[in-house]
Image: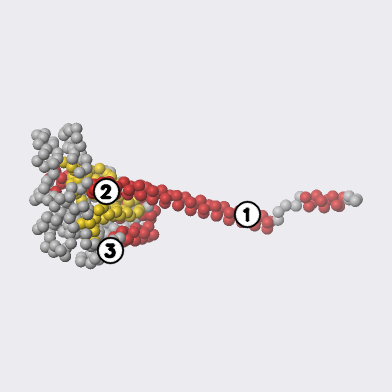
């Protein structure tokens, strides 16, 4: 084989040949698609992880709160000659009084309150020293709705456990000795030392050092009753069996004897979501955490189905979820208050039934 100058030139030209412009463009296009797919995959994974962390935060808080309530209800002193500060037509001002369903917060109370006697340890008064824990406590729950300024408990679930003494047993002359449990006709709301158990504003009557935040993410608290006959109601007795009954002790001393279970519903937001709402609330048009809570309807006024109409289990929680989903999509409440959508996405609703059938 004879190697000529022409053949050598041809071989060199072929060895130096590269990709064509078309091939380079196709390669770059494919590479861009791969990068975009990888970026989208990472973004999706990050969003899933972030939402998972939000739900983990709210799940943990809800479990702590509901487990604490379970202990308090399990040790509740169940007697018909005792008062219970729970939702009923009279002797109770802790209800939201019909807010929600697009009406927003109009100066009324958003969440429910409750107070009852339970055989759990409580805080003794300052200055009282004893080697024993209190045999009984006045337990109370509320979402703090006082002034938002310089109030770390604002919009958070609080629990009070005020250590008491058994009536006619604690004869300690110390003026700071525990206030004893009281029996009917004396009621919880008439004891000035327990005023914070039934008040919830920025007044002195609503302040008590025995309150502590138990649910920093819980901004909405509502409860209702499952009666032993199967009815779901916001009255702690069957109004058809006792049409003239005004309170749990008048004219018949019923106590909570007609209740099978107390159903508690709470709305919980993760810490990042609460911080986002708090930061945005200083801007015009934006609402704070209790403006959002006010849009979640009371059980009594579940969007016009109150009165004598029968409600079903889960109705209230379903409506709460619908409203929160709408806020997460639109970024505003039914009343028109702006709420950061990402904050609303981190809110979850929980419900638990606490059995009282041992009455």
Q: Earlier in the sequence, mark 2 or mark 1?
A: 1
Q: Earlier in the sequence, mark 2 or mark 3?
A: 2
Q: CA distance from mark 1 to mark 3?
A: 60 Å
The residue under label 3 is 312
Q: Residues within 10 Å of mark 2 (few under 14, many from 20)?
A: some
In this picture, residue 11 sits left or right of residue 236: right
Q: At 27% from the left edge and 46% from the top edge, which residue is drawn?
A: 68
| On screen, residue 89 above or below 217 | below
Total number of numbered labels?
Answer: 3
Snapshot quadrant of residue 213: top left
Snapshot quadrant of residue 161: top left
Q: At 51% from the left edge and 54% from the top edge, which residue is drawn?
A: 40
Q: At 39% from the left edge and 53% from the top edge, which residue is drawn?
A: 342
The residue under label 2 is 70
Q: Which mark is residue 28?
A: 1
Question: x%, y% of residue 308?
Answer: 20, 66
Residue in the foreground of this view, choosing between 242 and 88: 242
Question: x%, y% of residue 276?
Answer: 36, 49
Question: x%, y% of residue 313?
Answer: 28, 61
Q: Secondary structure at mark 1?
A: helix
């Amino acid at each position: 084989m004879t190697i000529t100058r022409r053949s050598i030139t041809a071989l060199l030209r072929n060895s130096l040949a590269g990709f064509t412009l078309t091939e380079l463009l196709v390669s770059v296009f494919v590479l861009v698609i791969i990068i975009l797919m990888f970026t989208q995959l990472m973004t999706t994974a990050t969003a899933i992880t972030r939402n998972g962390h939000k739900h983990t935060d709210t799940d943990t808080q809800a479990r702590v709160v509901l487990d604490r309530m379970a202990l308090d209800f399990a040790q509740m002193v169940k007697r018909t000659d005792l008062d219970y500060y729970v939702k009923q037509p009279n002797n109770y001002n802790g209800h939201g009084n019909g807010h929600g369903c697009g009406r927003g917060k109009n100066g009324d109370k958003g969440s429910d309150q409750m107070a009852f006697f339970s055989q759990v340890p409580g805080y003794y008064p300052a200055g009282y020293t004893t080697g024993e824990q209190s045999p009984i406590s006045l337990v109370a729950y509320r979402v703090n709705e006082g002034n938002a300024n310089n109030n770390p408990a604002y919009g958070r679930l609080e629990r009070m456990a005020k250590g008491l003494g058994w009536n006619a047993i604690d004869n300690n002359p110390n003026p700071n000795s525990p206030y004893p449990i009281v029996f009917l006709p004396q009621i919880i709301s008439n004891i000035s030392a327990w005023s914070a158990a039934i008040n919830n504003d920025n007044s002195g009557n609503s302040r008590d050092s025995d309150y502590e935040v138990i649910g920093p993410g819980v901004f909405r608290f509502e409860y209702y009753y499952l009666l032993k006959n199967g009815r779901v109601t916001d009255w702690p007795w069957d109004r058809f069996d006792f049409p003239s009954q005004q309170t749990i002790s008048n004219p018949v001393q019923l106590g909570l004897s007609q209740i099978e279970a107390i159903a508690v519903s709470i709305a919980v937001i993760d810490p990042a979501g609460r911080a986002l709402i708090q930061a945005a609330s200083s801007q015009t048009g934006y609402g704070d955490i209790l403006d959002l809570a006010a849009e979640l309807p009371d059980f009594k006024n579940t969007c016009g189905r109150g009165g004598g109409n029968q409600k079903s289990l889960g109705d209230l929680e379903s409506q709460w979820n619908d409203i929160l989903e709408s806020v997460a999509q639109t970024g505003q409440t039914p009343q028109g208050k702006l709420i950061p959508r990402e904050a609303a996405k981190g809110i979850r609703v929980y419900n638990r039934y606490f059995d009282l059938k041992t009455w």
